[in-house]
Image (cartoon, rainbow, N blue to C red):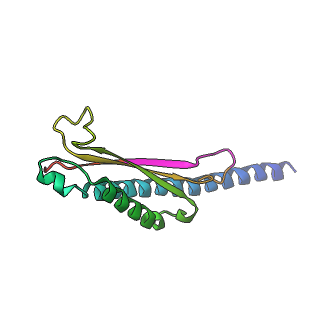
Amino acid sequence: MKVFIVFSAIFMMGLTCIVYQGDMNAYMHEQETLKMIAEEAACRAALELDESAYGMGEKRFDEYAAESSVAAYVSEARRLLAYGGKYEISFKMSYEDDEHGYSIGNDEEFPAVIVSVRVETDDFFRLPFLHRNSITRKSKYEIKGL
């Protein structure tokens, strides 16, 4: 009986480690994919400069075009995530330009877009003692050539 109890304990410990490794691998993949989505979204948003304002010498973003471009990309990029159908994906955008002002570290006043992408779900891990239900990744894209 002692052998059975010890074997059961070792088996359960090994099974727990295997499940943890699989879930952690999927979690890390989701983090990397979400960072890539945030970087691409920031790049797309930075391409949406307000051309009429730029013609008058102002560095300003077209917020409506930028947000619609990012929203379209984020909804399209859902398929890149392993369990994208189960997630709620949201994003926030902030701008550094002549209209919104510049951050303290941006002394040369380069226009920039910061996109924060957040994914929420019930839980990323199957083990009952691990609870992680959201991932947030940010990306900043500066335009230095203006």
Q: Residue at x 31, y 53 (%)?
A: 63
Q: Position of residue 45 (x, y in %)?
A: 30, 56
Please say if 82 is above or below 113: below
Question: Hey, which residue is sitting farthest right in the picture?
Answer: 1
Q: Position of residue 12 (x, y in %)?
A: 72, 52
- Magenta segment boundaries in residue numbering: 128-138
Would residue 58 appear left or right of 29 to someone viewing this image? left
Which is nearer the eye, 34 or 4?
34
Q: Residue at x 39, y 63 (%)?
A: 73
Q: Residue at x 25, y 58 (%)?
A: 48
Q: Residue at x 67, y 44 (%)?
A: 129
- Magenta region includes residue 84: no
Q: How many marks?
A: 0
- Magenta region includes residue 129: yes
Would residue 122 appear left or right of 44 to someone viewing this image? right
Would residue 25 appear left or right of 49 to someone viewing this image? right
Which is nearer the eye, 19 or 143?
143
Q: Position of residue 72 (x, y in %)?
A: 40, 64
Please say if 77 is above or below 93: below
